[in-house]
Image (tube, coloured by chain):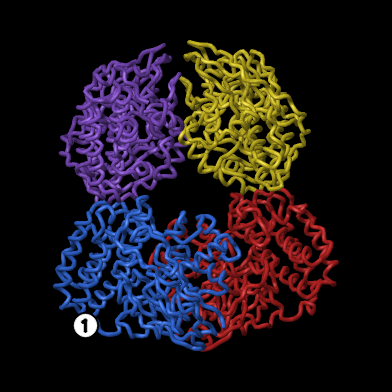
Chain colours: A red, B yellow, C purple, D blue
Amino acid sequence: MARSRTAPGQIDLVTRYREVRGLSEALAAPLSDADATVQSMPDASPAKWHLAHVSWFFECFVLRDHVPGYAPFDPHYAYLFNSYYEAEGPRHARPMRGMLTRPTLEEIRAYRAHVDRALAAALPMLMPDAQALVLLGLHHEQQHQELMLTDVQHLLSLNPLEPALYDAPNALPAPLPGPLHWIEGRQGLVEIGDDGKSDFAFDCETPRHKTVLHPHALAHRPITNGEWIAFIEDGGYADAALWLSDGWAWVQAERIEAPLYWRRGDQGWTRFGLDGRKPVNPAAPVSHVSLYEADAYARWAGARLPTEAEWESAALNVAPTSGNQLDGSACPRPRAADGGSALTQMYGDVWEWTGSAYRPHPGFRAAEGAVGEYNGKFMSGQFVLKGGSCATPRGHMRPSYRNFFYPHQRWQFTGLRLAKDL
Amino acid sequence: MARSRTAPGQIDLVTRYREVRGLSEALAAPLSDADATVQSMPDASPAKWHLAHVSWFFECFVLRDHVPGYAPFDPHYAYLFNSYYEAEGPRHARPMRGMLTRPTLEEIRAYRAHVDRALAAALPMLMPDAQALVLLGLHHEQQHQELMLTDVQHLLSLNPLEPALYDAPNALPAPLPGPLHWIEGRQGLVEIGDDGKSDFAFDCETPRHKTVLHPHALAHRPITNGEWIAFIEDGGYADAALWLSDGWAWVQAERIEAPLYWRRGDQGWTRFGLDGRKPVNPAAPVSHVSLYEADAYARWAGARLPTEAEWESAALNVAPTSGNQLDGSACPRPRAADGGSALTQMYGDVWEWTGSAYRPHPGFRAAEGAVGEYNGKFMSGQFVLKGGSCATPRGHMRPSYRNFFYPHQRWQFTGLRLAKDL
Amino acid sequence: MARSRTAPGQIDLVTRYREVRGLSEALAAPLSDADATVQSMPDASPAKWHLAHVSWFFECFVLRDHVPGYAPFDPHYAYLFNSYYEAEGPRHARPMRGMLTRPTLEEIRAYRAHVDRALAAALPMLMPDAQALVLLGLHHEQQHQELMLTDVQHLLSLNPLEPALYDAPNALPAPLPGPLHWIEGRQGLVEIGDDGKSDFAFDCETPRHKTVLHPHALAHRPITNGEWIAFIEDGGYADAALWLSDGWAWVQAERIEAPLYWRRGDQGWTRFGLDGRKPVNPAAPVSHVSLYEADAYARWAGARLPTEAEWESAALNVAPTSGNQLDGSACPRPRAADGGSALTQMYGDVWEWTGSAYRPHPGFRAAEGAVGEYNGKFMSGQFVLKGGSCATPRGHMRPSYRNFFYPHQRWQFTGLRLAKDL
Amino acid sequence: MARSRTAPGQIDLVTRYREVRGLSEALAAPLSDADATVQSMPDASPAKWHLAHVSWFFECFVLRDHVPGYAPFDPHYAYLFNSYYEAEGPRHARPMRGMLTRPTLEEIRAYRAHVDRALAAALPMLMPDAQALVLLGLHHEQQHQELMLTDVQHLLSLNPLEPALYDAPNALPAPLPGPLHWIEGRQGLVEIGDDGKSDFAFDCETPRHKTVLHPHALAHRPITNGEWIAFIEDGGYADAALWLSDGWAWVQAERIEAPLYWRRGDQGWTRFGLDGRKPVNPAAPVSHVSLYEADAYARWAGARLPTEAEWESAALNVAPTSGNQLDGSACPRPRAADGGSALTQMYGDVWEWTGSAYRPHPGFRAAEGAVGEYNGKFMSGQFVLKGGSCATPRGHMRPSYRNFFYPHQRWQFTGLRLAKDL
C-alpha cells in the first residue's frame, strides 16, 4: 500500500485531486463512445473502464468506508469496475470488459462527476488515513492514465484505417545522437528503495535496504530506433543464439520481426502511434519492445540489461525534470542526446527494461486490507522497468518506482538502456 | 444467386427498397455508437458492420458494376465491409470486426444515405440483370436484419446489467397449449425446391426436384418452453443415451444445462431477450436451442426431427401469414395453439431444425461471379432450418427457404417441431 | 446393431471366428511393444488398444452376458478398453489411450487367447441372439483391423526415420490409365440399403428404402495420383473459389498443399506408407485426401462427388471380388484400369468420398442396448464413404456399407470418383 | 559451461564414467520398451530419449570433436536426440519425442554400449579440455537420471492401473516430527556461488560474489505432509488472499486442490509414487508442490520462502551427506527430524523452492560454443530450487547448485522450507 512520508495534509490534496482527475478527462476527450468501449485484447482495458475503475477506487476505499451517508452512484458498478481485488468480492471477468456497451461514456462521465462532488465535499474532513487513501487513489489514477493511452493506441492500431487520436506535427528531423558513452556506476554497498524524498511511494518500493553493486557502467542514453534497425538488418530476429529460450519460442510462435507497430514499406520503416502512422525516426528511443527483444539486443551488442539496483542507484542524482510529453509531440520524441558525461533521458522517454525479476524488496510487507492486493500478488514472472515514458504523467516518476510487465509484453512505451560489467 | 420468377420490373422495387432499408434503420435506432460497434463473439458481427455491409453489397454489385460514374463513399469500405466474397479481394478479418470503432455509427448512417441517394437515382434506369441484383440485395439485407437483432441480443446478454433494447409489455399469461397432435404427411414422390410462386428465391432453393417421402407425421405445433422444462427436469441434459456423440461432447465441454439465455433462479427459469430478462413463459415455443439439443429432445420424446422435404412438403398448404413480430411483443410470443387438425406456427415463431444436412439440391448450380459465393460454399457441416422466426422480416419466409447453421449454434431463434415414422 | 439375414448358425462361425481373430494377430506381428502402445493423435488409437478393445467387445457382450460362469481376464480391462459405450459405464479417456504402457503387448496377447479359448468353448452352445453378437463382433473386429493399420501408418509417419512396417517390392511401373469414361447411372425410383444378400449388415445400412435418382453419370474409375498432381500444379490448393468455406479455412489453418503423407523433393513427389517412403505412383488411385480436397478437386474438374444413392445403386452390379490387398503390395496399388464401359475399382483400392452427409436412412432404428450406440450416435457432421480400400479385410465390403468420417480427416485410405449431372 | 576446479585428470574419470553410466542403466532396468517410449506431456521426455540424449552429448561434444576417426553409431541420432542446442542444428520437435517407437530400447542400449566402448578407449588420451567435457557430460547425465525417474513416474500416474515401477516396503510408521524451530542466518555481506570446494560446477553457479543478507531465520526442516494437510483443511487452496495472482489463476484453471499425485479417498489421502499408490505419510516432507503452492503455504503460515542467498549461505556448514535414496525406500522418506538446533534435511529429500528468480549471478558469462546454451538461455520466468531430492544422484548435490523450474511445475520432487524476517 501507499506510504506517505509527509502527512498528506501538507500536500494540497484538493488541488492535486482536481488536476489529476481533470487530466484523465482531457486525455479521454477525443474518444468516441465506441473508442472508449472496445477491448482490443485481454491485456488491455477499454478507456471507459479505466475512467470508471479509478472512480470506483475512490468510491469504494474512501467514500464508502470513510464518508458516512455516501450513496453510491449505482450499486452495480462495484461489480463492473473492480479490477482484481479479491477481497472486494466477485467482479466482471477481465476479458469481458469490452462487452460493457452500457453504461455509456456519458454515464461514466456523470459517475465521475458524482464521485468528484462527494469527494470534494468530504476532503476537508477526512482523517489522515483516509487522506492517504485519496493520495493512493490519485497515484493509482495516474497509472491508469498511461494504461488508457497505451490501450487506446493498441485498439486503434487494429483498425485498418489507422486513425490518429491526436494530431502531432511531423517532428523536425532531429540530428542523430552520437555514439553511446559509458558512465561508471557506484560499487559496493548502496541503498535503494523508497528514500522518503517524494511525497508518495507504493508499498513495493519499500523498505529502503542495502544491496551490493558490482563493477559496472550504464550507457548514457537509451538505444535508438536507428540502432534497432541495425539489429534487424544484422539478422537479430533470426539468430537463436541471441535469445532467451522463452524469447526464441515467442519470436517463432508470434513471427516477431520488429517492434510492435512497426511496418516495413517501400519507403522504409513506419510505426503507428497516437498520432497515426509515421516514419520511424532514427533519432528517437526505440519503444514497444519486449524484455525478450531488449535482452537479445543487449546480447547482440555485447552488453546486458542493467539490474534494478544499478539503474536506481544511478538515478539518484538525476532529477526527473524532463517530465512526460503529453503535449502533442511524437511519443517518445527524438532527441539528440548531447553525448556528455551524464546520464540522459532517464525519465519521460521510454520505460527501461531491467534484468531484474519483479520480486519483493527484502523485508517487504504488503499493506493491510484490499489495497494490499495492489502490488505484492504480481510478484512472479514479471520484470522490473524503471524511469517513465512519454506517456507517464508528471509527478509520477521517481528513482524507486517499480513498473513491471511480463517479458513478452510490449504495448507499453518500453525501451532499453545498456549496461556492462567492468 | 437469386432467381426472380417475375421480372423484377413488375415489383415496385423503389417502394420495396425504401421499406427494407428503412426497417434496418428503425431496428438500429435504439443502439448507441458502442452498442453498434462491439462484436460479442466470432460468430456474430457488430450492428454497425451489418448496416455497412448490406450497403457495400449494393455499392459493389450494383452501383460500381452497373452505374457509370458512381463515386464510392470511401474507398476503404470495400476492404472493411466485404464479408466473405473471396472473388472481391482481401478483407478485414471476421473476428476483428469489433475493432472498428471508426467509422462511427453516424458515418455509417451517412454511408447508407449516400448509397440510397445513388440507388434511388439509378433504379429507374437499371437493366433487368442489375434490377435482379437489387432484389437480391434486399433479400440479403433482410437476412442481416435478423442477424443484427440476434447479434445485439447476444452482446447485451453478456453485460451483467442485462439491458433491454426494446420495452415489451409483460405478456399476459397465455393459456398453455394442449397436447401435440400428429398430422400425417404426404407419401411417395413429391416435389420440393423453389416453385416460382414467390417473387424471389436464393440459388440454393433451386432446382425444384422430385424426392420420396416415407410414411410420417408432423406435430401440429412446435415444442414449448413448458415441455422443455419437463425434459430438463427428467435429466435430459445428463443422459448420454439421448445425444448424438458430438452433441454429448459439446454438452460436457460447454456445461450446457438449458437453452441459451436461460437461468434458473429462486422464482424458476428466466430468459434474456431483447426486452431484458423475463420469466420463461411455458406457453411460448422453446427457442435458442441447438440442433444437438433439438435432436436429444426428439429422442427423449420417442420421436425425431422432420426432414427438410417432409417440412417443406407440409408447408406448401400453409400461407406464411403469421409474419414476424417485430412489433414490441415478446419474441417468440406465447401462443395457445388451437389444437385443431392443422399445422400451426410454421412461420414467425422459431426457425425449426430439420434432420437434413445442408447440402445441394440435385442439379444445383451456384450463380456465376462473386454472388455465386452466396450459398454453395457453406454446404458442409450445417443443418437446414425451415420456416422463420419472430425476428424474420415479413416477406422473407417461404416453404423452400433454406436457413442453415452449425449443429451447436443457438444464438438464433431456433426451436423444433417433432416428426415420427408411421 | 447387426442384423443377420441368414441365421448365423448357417455360417461356420467357428471358422470365421478363427480366421478373423488370426488376421488381427498377423497384422500386428511386426509391431514392437512400443509400436503397439503409442497414440499418435486423438483420432487414432494404439494397436494394442485395438487388439484389446475388440476382445473386450466379445468379453462384454457375449461372454459376460451369455456364458454363465465366465471369469473375466482382468476386471480393469472393461474400464481400459471400452471405446465409447456410455451404457457400459465410465472408461479411460480417448486421448489418453497412449499412456497405457501396461498391460504390455504380451499381456494383451494373453488376453486375446483367454477370450478365444472361452469363446471357442462356448460357441456351439450359444443361442442365436448371442451368435448374432459374435457375428457382429467379428465385423467389428474387421473394422478395427483397418483402423489399426491406418493408425500405425500415421504413427510411423511421425518418426523422422520413416520406418517401413512391411516390405513391399517396388511396384513395377504400371501403364497410366487412360482418360475417364462416364457411365450413366439409373434414374428415377431405386432402392438402396441392406438388401439381404450378404450375411450381415450394420444397423445403419437399414432399412432398405426407395429414393430418387436424377440423371447422372459416374466416372469408370477413381482419380489417380497423376491427375491429382495436375490439380496441384494448376494451383488447386491456392484457389479459394474451388473450396467449401470450411475446407478453405482448413487448408489455410493447416497449410495443406498435398495429400497426407506426400512430400515434394528433388525427385518429385513421394508418399509415406506402411512400406516406407516411396515415389508417388501416378497410376495408383489418389489416397489420403479429405472430403474437402475431394470436393475441391471435383469442382476444379467441372464435376461433383457422387451421392451415396448414386454410388450404391451403381455398385449393385459390381461384385466386390477384387478384395483387399493385405498381401504385401503397395496400398493402394497402381492399376491400368481398362477403360472399358464398366465401373472398375469400386472395392479394394480406396474408400470413395460421397457428397452425402452421414444421416439415418428413412425409418432407421438403432439397436437396443449398448450395441445400439454403434452407429446412430455418430450421425452428425460426417460424410459417407463407399466401397472399401486396400486395407479393408476381405468379406467386409458390400454395396450398402456406410463408412463415415469428418470432412477434414484423411488418415484413412480415402480417395474419390467423380460424378456429373446429365 | 562446466568449470572444473581440480584438473579433471585428478579425478578417476574412468571409474566415474562407469559408475554414472551404469546407474542410468540400472534405473532403466525395470522399464519395458513401451514404458521407455511414451511421452506423457510436453514437459517430460521418454526414458529412452533420456538414455539416448545423454549418450549423444558424449558422442557429439567429445567423440565427434575430439576423437579422430570416431564413427557415429547412426547419423540420424544427432537429429533425434539433440535436446535444445540451436548451434547443433535442427532437431526433432520436443513434443514429438514420444513418437519415436523406433529405435527400440534395445537399439538404444546398443548405442550406449557403442559410445561407452569408444569413450573408454579414448579417455586416457583426451586432452584436459575434452576431459572437462566428459566431466560435464557425466553431470549432465546425472541431471537426466533424476528427470528420467520423474518423467516415468508421471507417465505411470496416468495409467489407471497405477503400476509400481519399484517395490518399496511399506514404510514403518515414523514418529511425527516436532514443531518447527527457527535457525537464525548470517547477516550482512556474505559470499555465494561456486566456492571451488567441489570438483565441478555448472557455469550458472559462477562467479562467486558478494551479496547482502538481511536479518532472517530458516526453519530447521522442510514442511511435512501432515502440515500440508492442515493447510488443505484450513481452505488454503480456496483463499485467493494467499496466492500470487498467477498462482490463483493456475489453481482455478487447473482445479488444483492438493499436491500432484495426491487423491482423497475414504481412508484419507493417498499419493502415487514409483512404488505405486500408498497412503500419504504425514511424517514425510511434502513433495510435488509448485512454487505457487509453496508460496501460498508460506503466506498462510505467516512466513515466506527463503532467498537463494539465504539458503546457500546457510548450507555452507551442512555437508550433503544424507545423499539420495535410490535404494528402494519411499521417496521422499519420512523422517523424525530431531528438532535440535541445526538445519536438517537440506539434501536428499526434496528440492526446496526459493523465492529467487533464476537470473544470472553478477558477472555471469555463458560458456563458449554449443555447451554455452546449457544454462544461460533459461534465465527468464523460472525460480531457483536448492538442495536435492531423494531422486538426485549422490555426488550431484552442493550448496551452489541452482536447479530451476517454472512456478507452476511440480512433477519433480519439489517441496519447501520456510523462512522469516527477523
Residue labelled with disc 1:
D9
* Residue nearest the observer in this picture, B104 or B413: B413
Q: Is residue B254 above or below residue C324?
A: below
To which quarter of the image does residue A19 belong? Answer: bottom right
Coordinates of residue C195 in the picture (x, y in percent)? 33, 16
Q: Is residue D323 above or below residue C215?
A: below
C393 relative position to A41: left or right: left
* Tag 1 subunit: D
Q: Residue at x 26, y 37 (%)?
A: C115
D251 relative position to A161: left or right: left
A304 relative position to C388: left or right: right
* Residue nearest the observer in this picture, A29 or B112: A29
Coordinates of residue B226 in the picture (x, y in percent)? 65, 29
Q: Residues within 10 Å of mark 1 (few under 14, many from 20)?
A: some
**Which quadrant: the N terminus of chain D?**
bottom left
Coordinates of residue D408 in the picture (x, y in percent)? 47, 63
To which quarter of the image does residue C92 belong? Answer: top left
C152 relative position to C213: left or right: left
Q: Secondary structure at mark 1?
A: helix
Coordinates of residue B209 in the picture (x, y in percent)? 49, 15
**Which quadrant: the C terminus of chain D?**
bottom right
Residue type at mark 1 is Gly
